[in-house]
Image (cartoon, rainbow, N blue to C red):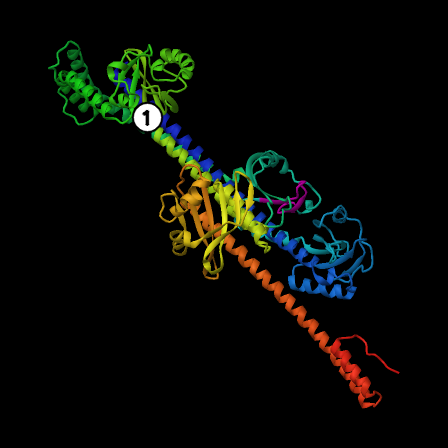
Amino acid sequence: MTFSTKISISVSAAFIACFIVAAYAGYKSSAEMLETEIRKDLEDHAFNAMDKLDRMLHERHADTRILSKDPVLRSGTSSPEQITERLNMYKDEYGVYTSLSFFDMNRIRIADTSGKDIGKQHALTEYWREIMAGRDSVMKITESSTSGQVIIHFVAVVRDLKGRPFGVVAARLPVESIYEIVDASFHPSHVQQGVKIELLDRDGLILYSSYNKKGILKEKSGDLEFLRPVMASEKSVGSVRHAYEGEDEISAYAVGQGYKSFAGSGWVLVTCTPATIALAPAYTQRKLFAFLGSGFIVLVLAATFFVSRAAVAPLKKLAAAAKEIGRGNFGTRVDVSSDDEVGQLAMAFNTMTAELGESEKKARGEEEKLRTITNTAQDAIVMIDPAGRIAFWNLSSETIFGYNNSEAMGRELHTFIAPKDYYESYKKGFMNFRETGQGAAIGKTLELEALRKGGETFPIELSLSALRLKDRWHAVGVIRDITERKKSEARLRMHQLMTETLNNAMVALAKDKDIYRGDIGAAFKTLTRVSAEATDICRVSIWFYTAGNSGIRCMALYDSKAGAHSEGIVLEASAYPAYFDALKQESCIAADDAIADPRTREFTESYLRPLGITSMLDVPIWTSGKVIGVVCHEHVGAPREWTSEEQGFATAVAGFASLAIEIHERLKMETSLRMSEENIRKLKEDIELKLDEVERINRLMVGRELKMEELRAEIRRLKSGQDKPERKG
């Protein structure tokens, strides 16, 4: 068989195979995309319909909750006529219910908007059983005992003003409300495409069906059997393709998820469509591909025959030139002038011999370039041979580890710069690497520890790769010193922990009852203790200005080491003028080195050194537009740099102290006002008593029944405050 014939057959077969694969892939992709779109469309419409149902049911549940809390129904004293009037008002207001009823807890119908069965006991239906079991509200679809219609019952327990259940209110909604919502959620085109719709309860009972009207509230759906495995995934929306009664179908479902306070009904909306109708465009496309493919195959066979003959001629010339080059005749040239791939191959043959002489020179240049690059790299680059000995050591390796090239070359790497803890695991892994070039660390970036020349352990980042040279595996490692990065990460973690601690402390203070009940002693103890614990410092205190702002007195001090509170220390302003001036002028005194800071160094001998305080963070307490005191944070130990977060927290503590003071003053004023009102009331009562006595004396004088001596005695008695007049015979 000639070469041209082989080309014709190979190319034709390749084209035909590619076409068949492409056609099948196109059909398959089109069918899958179409099925995906259909599933998505069915899922979206099912979800939207179920969402509308959940919203409607939420509104009806809300109606019954509002009705159950109506004061007329809850009073316990309303007459049946008043309750009926109230129910009619709600029925007219909502405009969706067929009737509303009110029962007592013995199921006796007290009132009903329809006026039927008043005074009769309702049957112990399913929703009554759930109410008796202790549920506050129930929703059930049943046949009404009064109207005979299939309706949705929304039932809620009515509690009296003391919270005791004494009645039940029931609202009845026509089941057609559900049907209208479901029908409105699907386009007429869905019906034309054979889409079937069912609404099921959690047990599979048909609540609505677009094609099985007789089975509503009587039969269970057959589709639930195929959907249960999909629904078991707890997804609220899904779909599945399955066979049902010998027909290929695509089914989608949406499970009610509830809305706001309504927990959900557990209903499932199911939509089904025959796959033959839904995927009809894909089947048509498959037939079209088959027709076009037949014509394409004929054209490919003819084209490859003529193309192969034209391609063979220059290939024969290339074959002859290759033989000459094989003999070492690098001056051979191929005379092919075409611009296609064959012409490019001929040009490659013509330049190959010229390039061979330059190959070795370029190789040496590339080797020098590689060494220059590795020596300028900031990371250490190390290569070890199959024996585990160092075969390459760049300049950064010398800087990072401290060993120069002559000290490192030929040394076993893992006994040289690796801690002893790593050596056993290295030996196990390196035996496998030496044979296969594979290992658990190859191709990965690891964080480890290494040893410097002086024996210091430090963190590194190691990236390993395998290199095969002369049929033997070598390992190349890029090593980075990450000491500074680790320090930065540790500082960041500490900063995050501190910020979280301070935030939690502020939240705790904002919720603490001691601050809001007017007891400033308890409030100040809480503020100082929480602040000391949050900032991890030894002493936190609250000070108030003394009379005339001549100094400050400690109102509360918490010592975290002793776990104790104290008070009473007084610091005179005349002894510390710089500090008191700063307190008036600055919003925050953050003295990292309190002994050196000009604002606080006056305290050195009398206060700081005796107590071991090295850093101070003081924030003024403002109230009614003036500074009345200060919150002090005092650190014992090495000098501490106060962060902006700590300064903000100290300012917040001062704000809480100001709030506690204002609440205390307000409560004191309120108490004083109440006492004044009580005194005025008592004075009024005394005056009224005196006026009664004077009036009685006037009556005696007018009747001339009292002698002058008796009058004087009455006047003396009134002056002395006696309770009863002395009658003389």
Where residue 486 sits in the image (x, y, percent)?
A: 38, 30
Q: Is residue 205 magenta?
A: yes
Q: Is residue 398 above or below residue 614?
A: above
Q: Which amino acid, mark 1?
A: Arg
Residue 441: which quarter of the image?
top left
| Residue 348 included in the magenta stretch of the image | no
User: Which quadrant holds the C terminus?
Assistant: bottom right
Any part of residue 44 in sight = no
Q: Which residue is mark 1?
A: 480
SS category of the residue bearing label 1: strand
- Where on the picture, by quarter, is residue 80? bottom right
Quarter of the figure with the N terminus: top left
Q: Which residues are magenta?
A: 196-212
Q: Residue 392: x and y, percent? A: 26, 16
Q: Is residue 486 above or below residue 634?
A: above
Q: Left or right of 611: which side holds 679?
A: right
Q: Is residue 237 left or right of residue 73?
A: left
Residue at 67 percent across and 70 percent down: it is 679
- Residue 204, image x, y percentages: 66, 40
Residue, far right: 729
Which is more toward the observer, 49 or 522? Answer: 522
